[in-house]
């Protein structure tokens, strides 16, 4: 069901070209949800208020109502932070400034913990697809490792930046993307699946694009984390209305299974920046120490090497599954 933003039950005030829609659970559960929270855009600070509901059948949380696929471009301005942070020149500058220190730390810790890129299964370089590749930094990194790396990106500005760096990127939504010429050995999506309008449909589609033994790796916010439960509408990773689904390990596993993928490993990311930013949003909402609150809310943008101060605590919290984001490795399932 679709309706004008000005007719929305939650009273959003958006441009008339933005259309909202009401849809059921993508897992086909019987109708029936209960209200979780309502919140606003704390990333781009665009107008509107949106609800999150939880399916009574499977527990999957979703934004309801939500912008249609055709309306979503309004919520992804050219200044959208992931577009800038994933530019290849930005990545290379960051590596030149911090690469030696990060490499030293990783070498010291590798015997005890597996860091982000080391959690990948052993595999030979092959053909890889990145869903929602933004400006192409990860494509660039994997290309340097010998992968034939291709991307899909909805933003024409970000996709053009990736193509300018020499990468093959298709500008379209995942829902509308055509069949590739060759199947993929690895498919990745960093903070992507929560943005997809029909995750089961997309997962089934990329299942057809893969081959037996293909790995799928995804990172998503962890909506079962203490950060979500404590900060609620102020949680940094909530990101309404861009995040259409809000996953826990159980609900994500169900969605992946419905799309033809079986979860093999779940890693809880070692990063507490979202908690600092959430505290800033919480303080802002209550008009507490506005200058400090705004500084904390933007912490992920400027933290730099400060993440090292939090690393011992974030490592511990990740081992007990309490951090705010997950990386999931799943394998293609065949009947």
Image: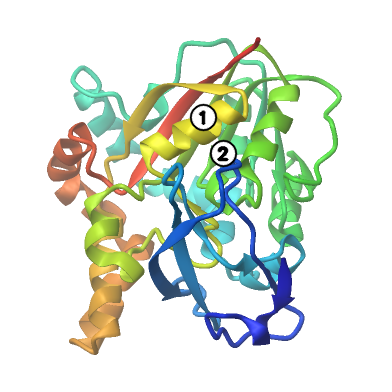
Kindly state the secondary structure of the residue where label 1 is placed.
strand
x and y percent of residue 169 in the render? 76, 42
Whether residue 257 sits left or right of residue 222 in the image: it is: right
| Residue 231 versus residue 271 in the image, above or below | below
| Residue 239 versus residue 290 in the image, above or below | above
Whether residue 105 sits left or right of residue 139 in the image: it is: left
x and y percent of residue 314 in the render? 19, 43
Gap between marks 2 and 1 measured at Cα: 6 Å
Q: What is the crowding at mark 2: few (fewer than 14 residues within 10 Å), some, or many (at least 20)?
A: many
Q: Residue at x 46, y 37 (%)?
A: 252
Colour treatment of the image: rainbow
| Residue 125 versus residue 242 in the image, above or below | above
Q: Quadrant of residue 260?
A: top right
x and y percent of residue 116 in the render? 37, 32
Res. 33 in view: yes
Quadrant of the image containing the N terminus? bottom right
Which of the pair 258/83 is nearer the observer? 258
Checking the image for residue 189, the label placed there is: 2
Which of the pair 303/205 is nearer the observer? 205
Mark 2 and mark 1 in contact? Answer it, CB < 8 Å. yes
Checking the image for residue 47, the label placed there is: none
Q: Residue at x 35, y 70 (%)?
A: 233
Q: Earlier in the sequence, mark 2 or mark 1?
A: 2
Q: Quadrant of residue 99?
A: top left
x and y percent of residue 272 in the render? 24, 52
Res. 209 in view: no
Whether residue 125 sits left or right of residue 105 in the image: it is: right
Q: Residue at x 27, y 29 (%)?
A: 106
User: Which residue is the site of mark 1?
Assistant: 217
Whether residue 165 sits left or right of residue 114 in the image: it is: right
């Amino acid at each position: 069901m679709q309706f004008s933003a000005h007719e929305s039950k939650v009273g959003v005030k958006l441009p008339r070209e933005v259309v909202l829609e009401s849809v059921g659970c993508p897992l086909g559960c019987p109708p029936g949800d209960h209200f979780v929270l309502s919140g606003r855009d704390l990333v781009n600070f665009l107008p509107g208020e949106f609800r999150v509901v939880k399916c009574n059948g499977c527990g999957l949380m979703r934004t309801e109502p939500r912008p249609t696929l055709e309306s979503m471009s309004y919520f992804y301005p050219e200044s959208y932070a992931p577009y800038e942070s994933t530019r290849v020149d930005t990545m290379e500058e960051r590596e030149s400034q911090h690469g030696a220190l990060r490499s030293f730390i990783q070498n010291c810790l590798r015997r005890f913990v597996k860091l982000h890129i080391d959690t990948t299964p052993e595999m030979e370089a092959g053909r890889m697809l990145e869903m929602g590749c933004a400006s192409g930094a990860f494509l660039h990194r994997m290309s340097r490792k010998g992968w034939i790396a291709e991307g899909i990106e909805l933003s024409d500005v970000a996709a053009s930046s990736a193509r300018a760096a020499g990468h093959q990127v298709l500008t379209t939504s995942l829902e509308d993307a055509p069949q590739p010429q060759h199947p993929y050995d690895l498919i990745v999506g960093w903070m992507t699946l929560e943005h997809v309008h029909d995750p089961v449909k997309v997962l089934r589609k990329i299942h057809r694009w893969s081959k037996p033994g293909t790995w799928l790796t995804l990172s998503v916010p962890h909506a079962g984390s203490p950060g979500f439960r404590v900060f609620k509408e102020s949680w940094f990773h909530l990101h309404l209305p861009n995040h259409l689904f809000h996953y826990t390990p159980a609900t994500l596993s169900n969605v992946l299974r419905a799309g033809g993928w079986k979860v093999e490993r779940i890693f809880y990311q070692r990063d507490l920046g979202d908690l600092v930013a959430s505290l800033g949003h919480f303080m802002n909402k209550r008009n507490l120490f506005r200058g400090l609150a705004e500084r904390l809310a933007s912490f992920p943008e400027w933290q730099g090497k400060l993440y090292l101060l939090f690393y011992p605590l974030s490592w511990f919290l990740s081992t007990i599954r309490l951090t705010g984001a997950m990386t999931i490795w799943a394998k293609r399932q065949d009947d």
